[in-house]
Image (cartoon, rainbow, N blue to C red):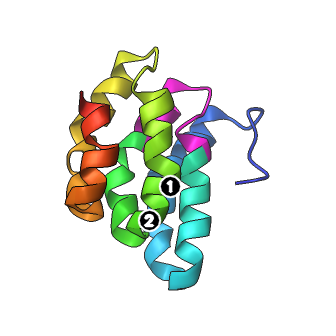
Amino acid sequence: MEGITKKTSWRLRFGIAEQSVNIAPHLPLQDRDSAVIGIYEKLLQDSEPEVRSEACNKLVEVSKHCTADEICAKLLPICNTYTVTDKSPHVRGTLAEVICCMAEAIGKERSNKFIVPTVI
């Protein structure tokens, strides 16, 4: 994702958000967190609302392939900081649809810390 910048077409960045989670099961377990979460960190903060929305939409699938520790440390803080207050109602709506489904992947204790504040 390092080579992908704001100058890269938003359609390409959207495609990356849409498809990169499909690559995760094929990566070695030790590389999943850094590769997949690194991509979604950037996509959740993208300049285009369509890209941010698609990244939010894939959070549940991302959580199936990455560790709960990394999701809580890197992705959920972005959701709490940026996505919850996003200017786009579509991004906020997509996050609202998927955030509660994340609770199963990260467990009750982490859900209380990272998901409940997002929902509230």
Q: Residue at x 21, y 51 (%)?
A: 101
Is residue 59 visible from the viewing direction of this image?
A: yes
Which span is picked out in magenta? 42-55
Report the label total.
2
Judge the density around disc 2: few (<14), some (14-19), many (≥20) Cα neighbours within 10 Å: few
Q: What's the residue at 51%, 35% (across, down)?
A: 51
> Which residue has dot 2 on it?
69
SS state under label 1: helix
| Relative side of 49 to 8, left or right | left
Find residue 36 and report its image quarter: bottom right
User: Residue 19, position in %: x, y?
Assistant: 48, 57
State which quadrant residue 27 falls in: bottom right
Q: Do the residues labelled 1 and 2 touch (CB within 8 Å)?
A: yes
Helix, strand or loop status at disc 2: helix
Instruction: Using residue 71 as the reference point, say whether residue 12 is left or right of it.
Output: right
Report which quarter residue 96 is drawn in: top left
Query: How far separated are the C-alphas under marks 1 and 2?
Result: 6 Å
Magenta stretch encompasses residue 88: no
